[in-house]
Image (spheres, helix red, strand yellow):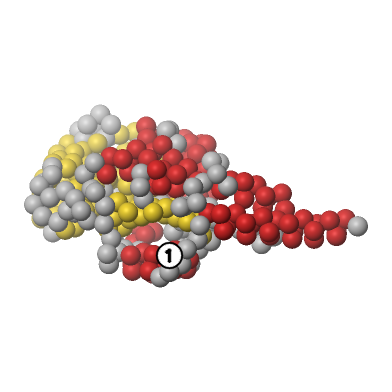
Amino acid sequence: MKRFPTLIVLAAMTTAAGCGMQGLILGTEGSYLLTVRDALALPNEEVQLRARFQVGDFLRGRQGHVVRFDQGGKIYKATVTDADGVATVTFTPTQAGDYRFAAEVSPDGLPDDPPAPRELLVACRAAEEPIAVVDLDKTVVASGFHTVLLGNPKPMAGSPEVLNRLARTHTVVFLTHRPDYFGPKSKTWLKAKGYPRGPVLLATVGSFLKGSGAYKSEMIKTLKKRFTKIEIGIGDKTTDVRAYHENGLKAFLIVQVPQDASSQKLEALADSIKDLPDAIQVVTGWDQIEAALFGRGKFPRSAMEKRIRRLAAQRRRAEAAKTK
């Protein structure tokens, strides 16, 4: 749960830190930040295309500025931003498919060049479409969130390949607790690393403050009212996989077992998963997820707990031998 307060502090510091730090962490362009919100929709269901334009060191919403939504190189609709810098227009997909829009800020009235257009995806799917929900940090991203913010993190080994294979039969939805400030950087990274195209659903400030488990559970419950086959959930936090399991998903928890960890830390890791339902599969990497999804692999929670406790006992004996 350390990531929750860390993200609050980072978001507050970033919005107040000035253009240089914002550009490094959020991917702002000059003093501008343009974010969009992807959507998952049913055929003939009206959805909102939403973009937010923020300006300055404290990223305040810019009111009354024109934002254009283009589709296929042509203008679909244009509107002006509200007091929060948000521009919304409606769209109704007529059939299943991926509908891509580009949200573009008009240069009129800006002292500098506007930010580059942002791609907004409306993934329209039938109600019975199989769906897999996947987290980002320490799930497809190999490193922790600090590295995500300040560098170009590596994908977790095998994750692009397994998810592209899964995307042949399921719509992959990236459901993350990251605040929507990090939308541009998140989507750029997923595209650059070769992950399948799918909607990236980020937390609003309000939903972020509820905590990751509550946010994920609420989002999945909302989606399940419209989509009947949300089948798979993959993440790295026990709160998330509980939310997946309690909502009827086949849940995978990815744990990292450091080979140099002390016996005390290993016991704490085993304790963190001991109360999870055994139906939740606990794995150490995407090779095991692939085996479970496409082969005969099974990785029950109890098996991982036993493995970690055996390793803790071995480490404890080694630690005792060093003190003699």
**Residue extending furthest top?**
83
- Residue tagged 1: 292
Query: In which quadrant will I find the N terminus?
Result: top right
Asked if residue 35 lies left or right of residue 11, the reply is left
Is residue 275 something one can see in this rendering? Answer: yes
- Res 195 quadrant in image: bottom left
Residue at point 35% right, 47% down? Answer: 248
Residue at point 27% right, 44% down? Answer: 224
- Residue 46 is situated, as x and y percent measured from the top left of the image, at 13, 42
Is residue 19 something one can see in this rendering? Answer: no
- Residue 286 is situated, as x and y percent measured from the top left of the image, at 46, 65
- Name the secondary structure under disc 1: helix
The residue closer to the viewer here, 241 or 86, is: 241
Question: Where is 248 relative to 304, above or below?
Answer: above
The residue closer to the viewer here, 83 or 122, is: 122
Residue at point 44% right, 59% down? Answer: 140
- Residue 238 is situated, as x and y percent measured from the top left of the image, at 50, 46
**What amino acid is at disc 1?**
Ala
Residue at point 37% right, 40% down? Answer: 217
Asked if residue 206 lies left or right of residue 42, the reply is right
Question: Where is 26 relative to 8, above or below?
Answer: below
The residue closer to the viewer here, 276 or 19, is: 276
Query: In which quadrant will I find the C terminus?
Result: bottom right
Q: How many labels does the image show?
A: 1
- Residue 59 is situated, as x and y percent measured from the top left of the image, at 37, 36
Asked if residue 240 lies left or right of residue 194, the reply is right
Q: Residues within 10 Å of mark 1 (few under 14, many from 20)?
A: some
